[in-house]
Image (tube, grey):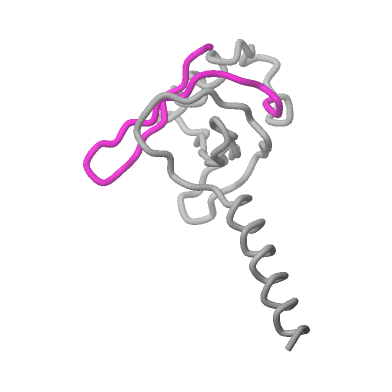
Amino acid sequence: MKSLQDLREKLRLASDKFDASRCHILQPGEYRFSIVEAKLEYDDKRQYDYVWVKLDCDGELTQDRFPINEQLLWKLRALLAAMGIDIDSFDPQDLVGCTGQLSAEKQADKTFYRYSPL
């Protein structure tokens, strides 16, 4: 049945596109990254604002969040420093298109991303 074969092919193509647009946790290693999306969000459960970014790391998509609280501001500062962005003039939208180096490190069952300049 031709229409059923066409439908299966369309579903397969749609599934491939969906998989390509999804973010994944990176394997340990060094990556060049480019920020493709960035926005300010609020975590209702933890009660803090954070900057959320989607990164293209050598063709693989991943995401990271940078909580805006006293204990974790170092993480956002490290990202901004890696891209040469001054914290005083920072706007999440300014991050889109910025590039840098990312090191993915596995510790126990978690993966951490560390940022540095190219």
Q: Relative to 45, say whether 86 is above or below.
A: above
Instruction: Choose between 76 and 98: the one closer to the eye.
Output: 98
Direction front: furthest residue: 1
2 or 49: which is nearer to us? 2
66 left or right, relative to 27: right
Query: What is the quadrant of residue 14 in the picture?
Result: bottom right
* Residue 2 placement: quadrant: bottom right
Relative to 29, 94 lies left or right: right
Q: How many marks?
A: 0
* Residue under the point 72% across and 70% down: 10
Quadrant, the N terminus:
bottom right
Seen at 73% across and 30% down, the residue is 93
In x, y percent, where is residue 45? 48, 56
State the residue lying farthest toward the left: 108
Q: Nearer the viewer, residue 50 or 37?
A: 37
* Image: magenta residue range: 95-118
- Residue 102 lies in magenta, yes or no? yes
